[in-house]
Amino acid sequence: MLNILFIVLGLVLLILGGNWLLKAAVAMSLKLNIPKIVIGMTVVSFATSAPELIVSVNAALEGFPDLALGNVVGSNIANLGLVLAITVILGSIEVRKSFYTTDWPVMMLASLLFFGFIYFDGELQRYEGLVMVVVLFVFLVYLLRFQKTAVLDELPEDDVPLPLYKMLLFLGLGGLGLWGGSELLIKGAVGMATFYGVSERVIAVTVVSIGTSIPELAASVIAVIKKEKAISLGNLIGSNIFNLLAVLGITSMISTIKVLDQRLLTNDIFWMLGISFSILPLVFLPKGLRLGWRDGLLLLAIYVLFVYLTIT
């Protein structure tokens, strides 16, 4: 009963946090005259990746490397197979040119870099973590310096400039709401999963990863409802990049991560690469630069199959 209460409270905090964070992100893009897609891929992505960072660092330090790795791999699969699926089922997304010129290629580069570092020796070393963080830094500098093209605003009257103190307050409250909500949700979900005797890796790539992906879902659904779709897509791609380069990069710099359950390398990591790659053809087929409800249903079906095969 207590675990169910943790889950409900966690969801409420996550929805509130997503709303506050979105307000701050929109206000920041107005104040700094930065495209919303860039704000979505930096500020929002970092705040919604904070739960993964906290969970992974704690798990690695406490001697649960599979929880640290499974959390990130599972979250990246959930971000595209669950969060993006639900987002585009609720409302189709017109995809910007920057998706295939910058965002998707960087996500695939981050995915392949992680694969190359961990697949052959089953370890993520400190120096490899440093390389990942440096790649992230270079990407962010590129975004902020060169990707300043205008993004079409579908509902400009909804853009309310905020004074700096309010913007920082919403940013802080949003980050705290997402972090606190995720903590409660994970505590409740892991408590329930442990009660039923499920393994650490299975908990990580299903229950924990879904829990830590709820912030992305909350932020993206709210963005779609408010017609801020540039933020919702940028947020998801950005979160996957942050999960790999920042979360695993920082975690492995603190403590070397060693794979215990080999199914992370023989199964889960290939699901992550596969679903990440599949977004590109889905964006171009059948209509160019668009994700619709059919794409959402396909992604959701892939995710359900992944969860089913992981649990059974």
Image: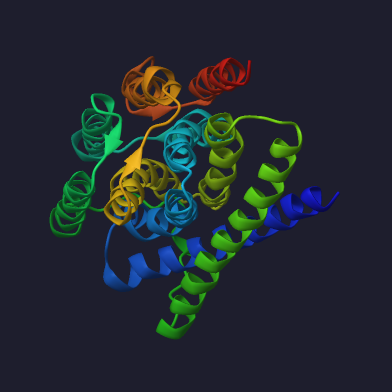
Q: Is residue 158 visible?
A: no
In percent of width and height, residue 265 lies at 37, 23
Quadrant where the C terminus is found in the figure: top right
In percent of width and height, residue 235 lies at 40, 48
Q: For the point 19% across and 56% down, which residue is it?
A: 137
In percent of width and height, residue 13 lies at 65, 61
The residue nearer to you, when weighing 283 against 109, is 109
Q: Is residue 121 visible?
A: yes
Q: For the point 31% across and 51% down, which residue is it?
A: 246
Tell how many labels. 0
The residue nearer to you, when weighing 40 against 263, is 263
152 lies left or right of 77: left
The residue nearer to you, when weighing 279 against 269, is 269
Above or below 2: residue 73: above
Above or below 205: residue 17: below
Q: For the point 48% across and 40% down, which residue is it?
A: 71
